[in-house]
Amino acid sequence: MNYSIPYGRQHITQDDIDAVVETLRSPYLTQGPKIKEFEEAFAKYVDSRYAVAVNNATAGLHLAAKALNVQPGHRYIVTPMTFASSANCIRFCGGDVEFCDIDPQTYLMDLAKLRTMLESHPNGYYQGVVVVDFAGYPHDIKALRLLCDEFGLRIIEDACHAPGAYVVDEKGEKQMSGSGRLADVSVFSFHPVKHIATGEGGMVVTDNPEIYERVALYRTHGITKDPTRLNKNDGGWYYEMQQLGFNYRLTDIQAALGVSQLRRAPQGLERRQEIARRYDKAFEGHPAIKTPWRAENVYHAFHLYVIQVPDRRGLYDFLRANGIYAQIHYVPLHTMPYYKELNDQEGQLPVVEEYYKHCISLPMYPSLTDDEQGYVIEKVLEFVK
Ligand SMILES: *Cc1c(COP(=O)(O)O)cnc(C)c1O
């Protein structure tokens, strides 16, 4: 049998197709009722008060940074183990980025190292952090909030990998990934490799009404028709552009798909857990394979299943030759020419640099069959003797 197995892919059902077709036949292709329905359902799912649907997570991160008033002269500390957008959103607003090394177990931003960075400068030197719930492993957002409050920092949580993930805190309460309770603002993606797919798409969530208002205003050109906010009112048609905003809207067609996908999200997460357990078991105790860390009080969303092996390049090539398209997440952001030119930190973040030499993301998505996973396991074990 010939296999062709990607590292991640969307799962589209007949219900999804029907939902999209229904919207295509409706009066609204954009700015209709499906946007609101998707926003409300999603806010509830991640335990946030407000949600704003956007055309992709990169735009969402830009809006998050705009809403926090990031501007030239501001400094944000960002994890280097992420996709470019997590740091780019600060640059879009003219702010500066410094990277903080990761924890060797969770691969999330190392909060001890973050503290060291914060303590080595006077208060006010940094304005905020961008953290990522990498691979679907949620940050201990309570600990992060306490630390950030100590130094007066804002938190942007890039939760693109982790819708549905949570940490159970010491009181037994679930702290959902991307919940608006503790981060100032969080962002999710609906790119096809993520948990919920709308083609392109994203969501910005927060519990803070001012941040919500700003995100919503900037999403739609900085234009408002809200009579309570107008400087004057010429009549029913009248609107004002009050800020230099963007068109970062999601369409109703996509929102319809999002609503339908969101209904199945818990099932998808359970299937991801099952796949992770089987990988864990297959590689358990293998001296050359390091499997993902899992803490007792964490529900991992497993966007990615990352292992570390001695000969990563060899394994990557071997798997490809066998029709398994594993991926590398990520090339550390501080080694990108663009960021090196701004502030060269290469050689200063040893944990992430070592991790990058060995990491590889194995296929992980709900529609991966048992047979396909068995083949992936067989090929990994065949190579990593
Ligand atoms: C996918 C992803 C993004 C970008 O999402 P888009 O919707 O493609 O713009 C940003 N950050 C992280 C961590 C991601 O995984």
Image (cartoon, helix red, strand yellow):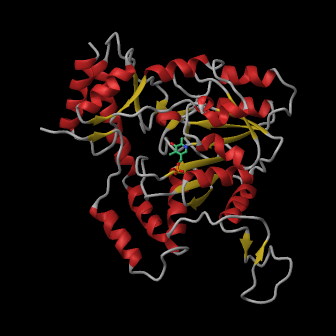
Residue 136 position, x and y percent, is 47, 36
- Compared with residue 167, is residue 260 higher up or lower down, i.e. above or below? below
- Compared with residue 31, is residue 73 higher up or lower down, i.e. above or below? above
- Compared with residue 218, is residue 86 higher up or lower down, i.e. above or below? above
Residue 318 position, x and y percent, is 28, 25
Q: Residue at x 48, y 57 (%)?
A: 200
Residue 208 position, x and y percent, is 71, 53
Q: Is residue 150 left or right of residue 6?
A: right
Q: Is residue 23 left or right of residue 217?
A: left
Name the residue at the bottom extreme: 235
Name the residue at the left extreme: 1
Residue 211 position, x and y percent, is 72, 55
Q: Is residue 125 left or right of residue 375?
A: right
Q: Residue at x 52, y 34 (%)?
A: 134
Image quadrant occupied by the C terminus: top left
Q: Residue at x 68, y 59 (%)?
A: 215
Q: Residue at x 18, y 36 (%)?
A: 371
- Compared with residue 210, is residue 330 higher up or lower down, i.e. above or below? above
- Total labels: the figure holds 0
Given residues 312 and 33, the one toward you in this image is: 312
Image quadrant occupied by the N terminus: top left
Given residues 193 and 338, the one toward you in this image is: 338
